[in-house]
Amino acid sequence: MPAYANSKGVRMSPRKVSEVAALIRGRTIADAVTILDHTPRRAAGAVKGVVVSARANAEHNHNYKPDSLHIVEITVTAGPRLKRYRPAARGRALPFARKTSHIKVTVDGEKRATKKKITEATAKEEK
């Protein structure tokens, strides 16, 4: 079962965020973080935060090996728009929308070996 992380309501245009997301689609987590560190776009910080969160979820909640993780899916969808008005000539007001994005990252990898729980029955058998 893959692990995932979401970030909703990111105050950036979905088109600009999805251009950054396309750079890391299908890569390993280590490669993706390196690429995002060196990408000079504002959206890179938001995408990196979601990737790092997905990595932490996979390691701590799903017991995956951190070195084996790779991005299975990264999607950027449009969030709600904040409708605003901007002053224009002749005392008018023209509408515009502040766009938001939802970012979802799904990662998968190799599971760690689980340790056996020592119970009283198994402890007696070992002696």
Image (cartoon, rainbow, N blue to C red):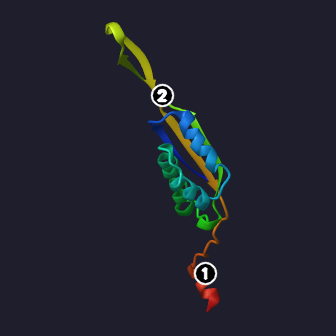
Task: Residue under label 1, please give it.
Answer: 121
Whether residue 92 is visible here, answered yes or no, is: no
- Percent of width and height locating residue 125: 64, 87
**Residue plotted at (50% across, 45% down):** 41
Location of the C terminus (image quadrant): bottom right
65 lies left or right of 101: right
Residue 94 position by quadrant: top left
Looking at numbered disc 1 in the image, what kind of residue is underneath it? Ala
- Residue 39 or residue 14, whichever sits in front: 39
Looking at numbered disc 2 in the image, what kind of residue is underneath it? Pro
**Residue plotted at (62% across, 54% down):** 107
- Percent of width and height locating residue 57: 53, 57
Residue most toward the left? 91
**Residue plotted at (61% across, 76% down):** 116
* Residue 13 sits above or below residue 37 on the image: above
- Percent of width and height locating residue 58: 57, 59
**Residue plotted at (57% across, 79% down):** 118
Residue most toward the bottom? 127
- Residue 83 or residue 113, whichever sits in front: 83
- Residue 101 or residue 115, whichever sits in front: 101
The disc label shown at residue 80, or none: 2
**Disc 1, SS:** helix
**Disc 2, SS:** loop
N-terminal of the two: label 2 or label 1? 2
The disc label shown at residue 62, or none: none
**Dot 1: few (<14), some (14–19), or many (≥20) neighbours within 10 Å?**
few
Residue 67 position by quadrant: bottom right
Which-is-in-front pick, marks 2 and 1?
Answer: 2
**Dot 2: few (<14), some (14–19), or many (≥20) neighbours within 10 Å?**
some
